[in-house]
Each structure stands twice: as C-alpha cells, then as structure tokens.
Image (tube, rainbow, N blue to C red):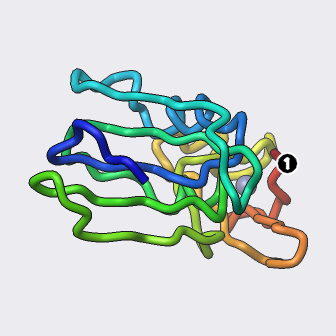
Amino acid sequence: MHIDSIKNGIVIDHITAGKGMQIYKLLGLDKLDCSIAIIKNVHSRKLGKKDIIKVDSDISVDIAALGYIDPGVTVNIIKDGALVDKKNISLPERIENVIFCKNPRCITSTEQELTHIFRLTDKESKTYRCIYCETKAETK
Ligand code: ZN
C-alpha cells in the first residue's frame, strides 16, 4: 500500500466499499483541521473494492466504534513516514456512545448524561443489547 505523503498519522484500510463516509462522520474526522483523504472504490484483491481513509495527523480513533461499523478494517499507524503499527479491528465486546437506546423507558432516556453502553450478546448475529434495559440495538 502507498502511504504517499503521510508523515505522522493513520491510515484506515480495508473499509467495506461505501462505508468510508460513514466512518468519516462517526469518527468526527469532519471536525479536524489536518488533511484527510477518503479514497473510494479502491481495487482490492481481498475485498474486490474497498475504501481507504488517510488522516495526516496523529489522532486517536475510537477503535470499538470502528469495529462496530465495519469489523475487518485495518488501522495503520504512521510515524516519520514509516508504518509502525497495524491493528486488525474486529467486532467489539462493548461500545460506548456509538448507538443510542431507543427504549423510552430506559434509564438513558431520562438520565441524559448517562453513557449509552451496548454489549455484544451474540457474536453470530452481531446482536448488541443496552446494558441497562437489555433492549436490542437496531441493526445498521
Ligand atoms: Zn436501554
């Protein structure tokens, strides 16, 4: 993979084609000042097509959120122009403030400042449930 001009930053690779924008918004990349590239529909031997996001800044990303949206992505950490770390992201056990409980009787709907926490209850069907009321998260 070509890292191109990135000196210190991250490259999110192997994004399912079409999910690049969703990840861009979810991670709040639209609020950053640094240069960011979203490359869509890159040819991939493994996936056919994929999206890639390059961020030219040493930011920390919400790995759990990323894994929830698109398990299978890879996060490459670039320092001084070299690849120093590569993380394979899988489905997280727990996510915080990524999805929100829709149950009107859930404590999170009355206690506004409460963190919305969901945990993975079934890996096979990728089912997440609210830790407070056990309500099943709506599928993406
Ligand atoms: Zn709930």
Residue 140, image x and y in percent?
Answer: 81, 45
Q: Amino acid at mark 1?
A: Glu
Q: Is residue 69 left or right of residue 75?
A: right
Q: Nearer the viewer, residue 132 or 126?
A: 126
- Front-lying residue, 56 or 65: 56
Residue 54 drawn at (x, y percent): 38, 39
Hey, which residue is sitting farthest right in the picture? 125
In the foreground, 92 or 109:
92
In the rendered view, would you say 18 is above or below 97?
A: above
Name the residue located 72 percent from the left edge and 44 percent from the top edge: 49
Q: Can you identify the residue that label 1 sits on?
A: 138
- Answer with the quarter of the image where residue 32 lies: top left
The answer to whether 30 is drawn above or below residue 41 in the figure is above
Q: Quadrant of ligand 1?
A: bottom right
Q: Quick check: 84 above or below 18? A: below
Q: Quadrant of residue 100?
A: top right
